[in-house]
Amino acid sequence: MKHKVCRYCMHQHLKVATGKWKQISKYCPLDLYSGNKQRMYFALKSLLQEAQNNLKIFKNGELIYGCKDARSPTADWSELAYHLKPFFFPSNGLASGPHCTRVVIRELVRVITRVLLSGSDKGWASALRLGPGSQGPCVCEASPFSRSLPHQGKSSLERSGLPKGCLLYKTLQVQMLDMLDIEGLYPLYRRVERYLEEFPEQRKTLQIDGPYDEAFYQKLLDLSTEDDGTLAFALTK
């Protein structure tokens, strides 16, 4: 199942079943990180429709859009459009109402997509290159976008990849440093917890609370990369 459906989408079903959220979000992170503008647009719009606790938008330090499960997306979008309209359309006379809201939201998604795909060194990247995880699964079968392909007369998704150096590419590279996943990390975390309960004085020796300086990270790099059952290995993870 994990090779066909991403963890986020699996957790969506669990959270709705346990009553944490009222309905399943159509957002899938694999769509957002695909580099395909159509999939990214769908992901961002879905995230705006069901923000849950995954998206918050601030204006001058004030929260203007966030987790309000009790309210309808239409009401939230209207309020968000009211706040953002002056930034996108300062003096064009765009009236209020549903049409104005849709136009502002569409422009917001377009701007966010452009920012996420832009490289910090050369601005807008014209050539899309596959990121480091290109050999892995790029489609989540639970994504509504993926399920809509047969109705569009398509059998598979076009694979674009991310521009090297863009914000999403860098974020993805950091995420891919995790080689163990939560199932592998949690037992190591418990190993450290049990050790510190027995030897609390070791918190300072092991720099559990810092400082996390260059010398600390170098010490971690010098430790074993294979699980030999020691606390040292658990700490590196």
Image (cartoon, rainbow, N blue to C red):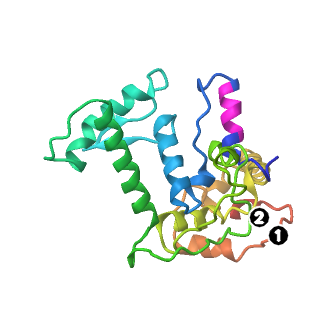
- Is 200 left or right of 67, judged from the image as shown? right
Quadrant of the rendered image containing residue 131: bottom right
- Is 31 left or right of 118, judged from the image as shown? right
Residue drawn at point x = 36 percent, y = 43 percent = 105
Image spot of residue 87 (x, y percent) = 22, 48
Quadrant containing the C terminus in the rendered view: bottom right
In terms of secondary structure, where does tag 2 sit?
helix
Residue 234 colored in magenta in the image: no
Crowd band around label 1 with a 10 angstrom C-alpha radius: few (<14), some (14–19), many (20+): few
Residue 12 colored in magenta in the image: yes
Q: Is residue 80 above or below residue 109?
A: above
Task: From the image, tell me which residue sits under label 1.
Answer: 226
Residue 212 can be seen, yes or no: no
Magenta segment range?
Answer: 10-16
Of 130 and 61, nearer the camera is 130
Task: Look at label 1 and name its amino acid.
Answer: Glu
Residue 31 image label: none
Do labels 1 and 2 touch, CB within 8 Å?
Answer: yes
Residue drawn at point x = 20 percent, y = 35 percent = 95
Task: From the image, tell me which residue sits under label 2.
Answer: 233
Q: Of callouts 1 and 2, which one flags the residue occurring earlier in the amino acid sequence?
A: 1
Quadrant of the rendered image containing residue 125: bottom left
In terms of secondary structure, where does tag 1 sit?
loop
Task: Look at label 2 and name its amino acid.
Answer: Phe
Image spot of residue 102 (x, y percent) = 36, 39
- Disc 1 to disc 2, how far (Cα)? 7 Å
- Is 48 left or right of 182, judged from the image as shown? left
- Is 5 left or right of 152, judged from the image as shown? right
**Majority secondary structure of the magenta segment?**
helix
Looking at the rendered image, the disc whose residue lies closer to the viewer, 1 or 2, is 1
